[in-house]
């Protein structure tokens, strides 16, 4: 019997997912600068402690550390965490970054006794389980964040996905080809997808893995309710790190909440 899809993608086939993350690493520098501006706007400046939930290879954590933040990244995948530690060495931020193998569903127990000025969750890394579990993760992050601290969530917008749904997609990398076949359930706001990885070798493509992925996407009002139930107070939302207002045309949501 197969385990949860997150184990298949992030642990068993972490090498394939890592290729995708590596390709996005340079772009994460600009995203981190936008994120840092947002943090400063909310009283969390350089030197503050940041908890990065679902950090992957540390794309945003490492860039934030380069900007002067002290970051602890957690991820369920040992291979991805090991790569994050390597990148921290390469970028000279070992003294301002720490990477821990931890399931987001038990992060409070793993980091018991720690306190942070801010928690972040980037790249649509919420919604992997059910709504009750998502609320538990946010509540645990609330317990790890100082009163008045903030949470920044960057995720896909349910409203935009339902308006401009694409049933298939292709991601081409130098050595990897990823095909995605998707279905979106309007009743549950859950997207089911088959991710098929191929080795990209000229005109020949060798099948590497096929993984069934399922994720819950939230509308803004649902995220606000989820955060409120977990002990946070909604502050503001944007569509991007240029801090533009949310819109039905924007495919991303950035939600900022404060610890009550």
Image (tube, rainbow, N blue to C red):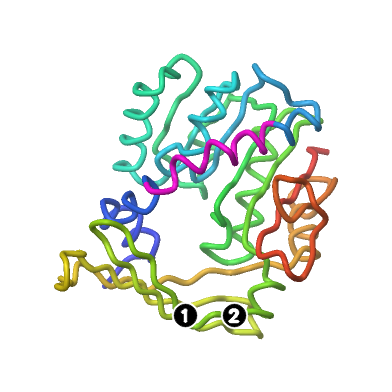
Does residue 18 belong to the magenta stretch?
A: no
Residue at 64% across / 51% down in the picture?
A: 154
Q: Residues within 10 Å of mark 2 (few under 14, many from 20)?
A: few
Q: Quadrant of the N terminus?
A: bottom left
User: Is 44 located above or below residue 195 in the figure?
Assistant: above
> Which label number is shown at residue 165?
2
Q: Earlier in the sequence, mark 2 or mark 1?
A: 2
Outermost residue, front side: 202
Name the residue nearer the viewer: 259 or 79.
Answer: 79
Q: Where residue 205 sits: x, y (%)?
A: 17, 72
Outermost residue, top side: 95
Does residue 25 belong to the magenta stretch?
A: yes
User: Is 74 located above or below residue 14 in the figure?
Assistant: above
Q: Give the quarter of the image for residue 33.
A: top right
Labelled pair 2, 1 in contact (Cβ < 8 Å): yes
Q: Where residue 157 sits: x, y (%)?
A: 67, 65
Left/right placement of residue 170 relative to residue 144 reads: left
Q: Give the quarter of the image for residue 88.
A: top left
- The CA distance from mark 2 to mark 1 is 9 Å
> Which label number is shown at residue 182?
1
Q: How would you classify the magenta stretch by its main secondary structure?
A: helix
- What secondary structure is marked by label 1? strand
Q: Quadrant of the C terminus?
A: top right
Q: Where residue 93 sits: x, y (%)?
A: 45, 19
Left/right placement of residue 177 relative to residue 107 reads: left
Q: Which portion, as a residue range, is magenta?
A: 23-36
Q: Where residue 11 sits: x, y (%)?
A: 31, 53
């Amino acid at each position: 019997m197969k385990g949860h899809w997150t184990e298949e993608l992030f642990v068993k086939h972490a090498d394939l997912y890592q290729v995708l993350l590596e390709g996005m690493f340079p772009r994460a520098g600009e995203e981190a600068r936008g994120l840092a501006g947002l943090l400063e706007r909310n009283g969390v400046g350089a030197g503050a402690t940041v908890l990065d939930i679902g950090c992957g290879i540390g794309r945003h954590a490492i860039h934030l550390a380069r900007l002067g933040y002290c970051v602890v990244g957690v991820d369920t995948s040992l291979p991805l965490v090991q790569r994050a530690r390597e990148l921290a060495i390469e970028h000279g931020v070992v003294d301002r970054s720490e990477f821990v193998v931890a399931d987001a569903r038990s992060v409070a127990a793993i980091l018991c006794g720690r306190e942070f000025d801010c928690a972040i969750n980037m790249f649509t890394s919420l919604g992997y389980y059910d709504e009750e579990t998502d609320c538990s993760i946010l509540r645990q992050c609330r317990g790890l964040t100082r009163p008045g601290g903030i949470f920044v969530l960057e995720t896909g917008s349910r409203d935009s996905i339902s308006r401009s749904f694409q049933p298939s997609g292709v991601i081409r990398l130098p050595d990897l080809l990823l095909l995605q076949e998707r279905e979106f359930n309007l009743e549950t706001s859950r997207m089911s997808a088959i991710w098929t990885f191929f080795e990209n070798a000229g005109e020949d493509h060798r099948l590497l893995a096929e993984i069934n992925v399922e994720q819950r996407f939230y509308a803004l009002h649902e995220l606000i309710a989820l955060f409120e139930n977990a002990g946070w107070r909604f502050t503001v939302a944007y569509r991007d790190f240029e801090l533009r207002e949310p819109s039905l045309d924007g495919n991303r949501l950035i939600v900022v909440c404060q610890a009550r």
